[in-house]
Image: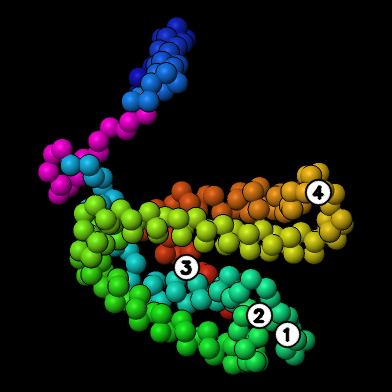
């Protein structure tokens, strides 16, 4: 261990601070300063824009097995978002429990048992297409950005990637909104007075201060740490989820 006296420590901190200040100044005055250094790839030749995420998954990161994927999809099909098919909802009483099903299915004349069966059948049929679509990536251990080039080509594959990106924005927002609604139920169960939380936003905005607090603050704080974990280390979360969600 290197022992530094007070003056050397202040000097090093000062030099680091000056470098940070120069970096901020350069990014404030030049667009080219925002360009990231080209990362190295395991397989791509020099001069190609790529990164490690475009490489095949190395063996030490292949931690997801059959049961991990089964737990992931099973728990995903039991989430509140999946059951909310349609813009509106209808509440059906089932043995004293409130079951929420999409009005788009119930409006066709099906009861809650038939609706659950239809959604389970639809999910099964969808899984066949998803398995076939992901077979190449699962066999070769390559990401979606690479497999999509076989169908769309090198440049047009960007359309598929960007489309998937936009869809993920909507899906993440919907899930986060549902998570905020769950936070509301838990807080109101602990502190009933929370139901009368005053609104400090303009009435014409269509949003309540309570909803903003739940979505952007409370639920975001809960899920943000999980976004920092590499997917190869998240298998335990979905195994736990498949046990908790049905309960």
Mark 1–mark 4 distance (CA, rounded to whole Å): 32 Å
From the viewer's side, name the closer residue of 221 and 59: 221
SS at mark 4 in the image:
helix
Mark 3–mark 2 distance (CA, rounded to whole Å): 29 Å
- Relative placement, left or right, of 156 versus 237 is left
Instruction: Find residue 112 and report its image quarter.
Output: bottom right
- Residue 103 circle label: 2
Circle 4 packing at 10 Å, graded few (<14), some (14-19), many (20+), is few
Residue 15 x/y as whole percent: 40, 12
Res. 126 visible in picture: yes
First along the sequence among labels 3 and 2: 2
Residue at x-position 57% and y-position 62%? 175
SS at mark 1 in the image:
strand
Mark 3–mark 4 distance (CA, rounded to whole Å): 40 Å
First along the sequence among labels 1 and 2: 1
SS at mark 3 in the image:
helix
CB-based contact (under 8 Å), mark 1 and mark 2: no
Mark whose residue sits in front, 3 or 2: 2
- Residue 92 circle label: 1
From the viewer's side, name the closer residue of 96 and 33: 33
- Residue 203 circle label: 4
SS at mark 2 in the image:
helix
Circle 2 packing at 10 Å, graded few (<14), some (14-19), many (20+), is some
User: Where the C terminus falls, by quadrant?
Assistant: bottom right
Above/below status of 241 relative to 163: below
Number of numbered markers = 4
């Amino acid at each position: 261990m290197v022992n530094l006296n007070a003056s050397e420590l202040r000097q090093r901190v000062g030099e680091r601070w000056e470098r940070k200040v120069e970096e901020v100044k350069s990014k404030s005055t030049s667009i080219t300063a925002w360009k990231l250094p080209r990362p190295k790839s395991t397989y791509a030749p020099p001069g190609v824009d790529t990164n490690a995420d475009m490489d095949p998954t190395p063996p030490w990161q292949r931690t997801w097995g059959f049961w991990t994927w089964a737990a992931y999809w099973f728990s995903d099909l039991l989430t509140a978002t999946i059951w909310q098919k349609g813009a509106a909802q209808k509440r059906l009483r089932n043995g004293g429990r409130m079951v929420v099903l999409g009005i788009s299915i119930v409006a066709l004349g099906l009861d809650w048992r038939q609706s659950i069966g239809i959604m389970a059948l639809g999910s099964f049929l969808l899984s066949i297409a998803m398995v076939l679509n992901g077979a190449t990536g699962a066999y070769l251990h390559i990401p979606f950005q690479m497999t999509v080039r076989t169908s769309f080509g090198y440049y047009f594959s960007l359309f598929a990637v960007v489309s998937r990106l936009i869809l993920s924005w909507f899906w993440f927002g919907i899930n986060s909104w549902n998570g905020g609604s769950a936070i509301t139920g838990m807080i109101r169960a602990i502190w009933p007075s929370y139901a009368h939380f005053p609104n400090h936003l303009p009435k014409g905005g269509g949003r309540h201060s309570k909803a903003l607090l739940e979505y952007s603050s409370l639920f975001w704080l809960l899920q943000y740490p999980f976004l920092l974990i590499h997917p190869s280390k998240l298998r335990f979360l979905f195994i736990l989820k498949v046990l908790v969600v049905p309960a």
